[in-house]
Image (tube, coloured by chain):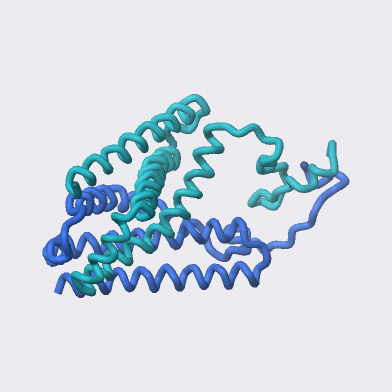
Amino acid sequence: MADVRDALIIGKRSDGKLVQRPLSPHLQIYKPQISTATSIFHRITGCALAVGLLLMVWWLVAAATGPRAFASAQGFVGSPIGLILMFGWTLALWYHFCNGIRHLFWDAGFGFDVKTSHRNAFAVLVATVVLTVLSWVVGLAVWL
Amino acid sequence: MAPKDKLSITVRQSELGRVKGLGAARSGVHHWWMERVTSVALIPLTLWFVFSVLGMAGHPQPDIAHWVSHPLVAVLLVALIVTSFHHTQLGLQVVIDDYIHGEGTRLIVLLVMKAAVVLLGLAALLAVVKLAI
């Protein structure tokens, strides 16, 4: 026991033996890295997408209600605020989508070493931009 | 950190409790596994939904109603709604578990969140059913 803080990281193995567990990084002193950034952005975009589901529910319920209700939902999406929200929503969606696939690869045991995980973090960012731009090109081409 | 060191904690747990491997959460890997299952299902469903809707950007309500009235579209929409709302509820639960301290508050926030997600999901499902039938 080098320090009293060590007491905080005592964990218990399944056989009851006490072991030292790694402590979560203290955010104030821990150097921000692409690994930590992609991790917290996965959570932030997930929460944003949960809010975005409200829009999907509104869109579906308005379509089921009738042409007038649908036109007002559509009017909101096409308004400046609606378009900004839609841009944020598509960006969050494709980020969460791509980084989620990265998580699934990790769960299957691939790409988890430091060098590869930094590389696939970069790939996630590139894919996010590509999918977001593609979505807007398709959407605007149909809309305008 | 071996038990023989000066600082140690005594853990009282039955052999059965150890074998079951369940702690205070009273459940195992089900939550984690369902998060993965729903995320795999959401990969094709999301691609299909987003690009289908983008392909109808600016179209009036009758076009949307006609699209949903196709049985395959209605079934896929129901699958998307069930999967995405289930996934959302699982993800938000982890965020609440991590950041809301105090067992009472955590339980209340959790129940309110689950109720909201379920009600919104049911509203979306009802809309699809109404358009499809």
Q: Is residue A134 left or right of residue A51?
A: left
Q: Give coordinates of residue B31: x percent, y percent.
A: 47, 59
Q: Front-most of A81 and A43?
A: A81
Q: Residue at x 41, y 34 (%)?
A: A125
Chain A tint in image? cyan
Q: Front-most of A6 and A15?
A: A6
Q: Is residue B58 left or right of residue A54?
A: left
Q: Is residue B43 left or right of residue A23?
A: left
Q: Give coordinates of residue A15: x percent, y percent.
A: 66, 51
Chain B tint in image? blue
Q: Is residue A97 left or right of residue A38?
A: left
Q: Residue at x 67, y 41 (%)?
A: A27
Q: Residue at x 48, y 33 (%)?
A: A112
Q: Give coordinates of residue A89: x percent, y percent.
A: 38, 50
Tell me which corner region of the image, top left, top right, bottom left or bottom right, holds residue A97.
top left
Q: Give coordinates of residue A83: x percent, y percent.
A: 34, 51
In the rendered image, the residue lying farthest to the front is: A80
User: Does residue A99 appear in the picture of this structure?
Assistant: yes
Tell me which corner region of the image, top left, top right, bottom left or bottom right, holds residue B69.
bottom left
Q: Residue at x 50, y 39 (%)?
A: A38
B106 shown above or below A90: below
